[in-house]
Amino acid sequence: MAEISIELIKRLRELTGVGITDAKQALVDAKGDFDEALEAMRKKGMTKAEKRGEREARSGVIGSYVHDNRIGVLVEVNCETDFVARNEKFTDIVKDLCLHVAASAPEYVSTDDIPAEDREKMAKEFKEKVVAEGKPADKAEMIVEGMLKKYFAERCLLDQPFIKNPDQTVGEFVKEGIAVLGENIVVRRFSRLQLGEVN
């Protein structure tokens, strides 16, 4: 077992936002392995984040970002209290979301925001493609479902790989923020304008 130093405990606290006792206990449970302790804390935080996700978020901020006077982004992110809305960690999350929207150009916040007609249109197109490729009819529905899931995951903000860490989705990044801040965070809506782009 590796030695559990004050520096390790401090580092774990800074990354997870937990108390000294919880950070030390996580390191003890992980036998001094910092990465294992961090992963355990993140998983624990994610379960707390999911519970917090049910609480109402009415405060927050509208973040903005303009890239090279060619791309402009507004993102509304809500939290539960004004105190968190003014918190540096929260404002950093909002800035990162603005940068992500500017770079990745999502169309929807989440799969819940996809209009039924868009789903039906894409399902029809994918079904025609699958039939044209001669796939078996009994597998066609499953193939179309997989194609739809992939297609919309690329277009939904919360399902996209996060530009600062492609190993996690934007949704996971937001849940991490919930775990650290101890409050529900909701990405309500966004708007992205690009010079010369016609909607």
Image: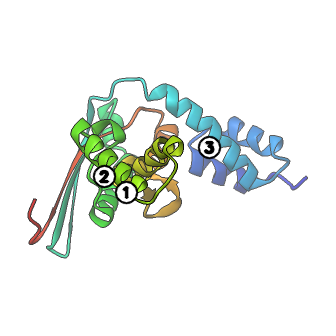
For label 1, the residue is 129
Tell me what residue is drawn at x 43 percent, y 47 percent: 144
Relative to 192, residue 158 above or below? above
- In depth, the one of 186 and 27 nearer the eye is 186
Q: Which residue is mark 3?
A: 42
Q: How is the image coloured?
A: rainbow
* Residue 13 shown left or right of residue 122 in the figure: right
Which residue lies under the disc numbered 2? Answer: 125
Residue type, label 1: Lys
Q: Is residue 7 visible?
A: yes
Specify the amino acid type for callout 3: Arg
Specify which label sits upstream in the sequence, 1 or 3: 3
Query: Where 199 sits versus 91, above or below?
Result: below
Residue contact between numbered discs 2 and 3, judged by CB atoms under 8 Å: no
Asked whether the beta carbons under mark 1 and mark 3 sit within 8 Å of each other, the answer is no
Quadrant of the rendered image containing residue 160: bottom left
Cβ atoms under marks 2 and 1 closer than 8 Å:
yes
Q: Nearer the viewer, mark 2 or mark 3?
A: 2
> How far is mark 1 from mark 3, CA to CA?
41 Å
Which amino acid lies under the numbered mark 2 shown in the image of this protein? Glu
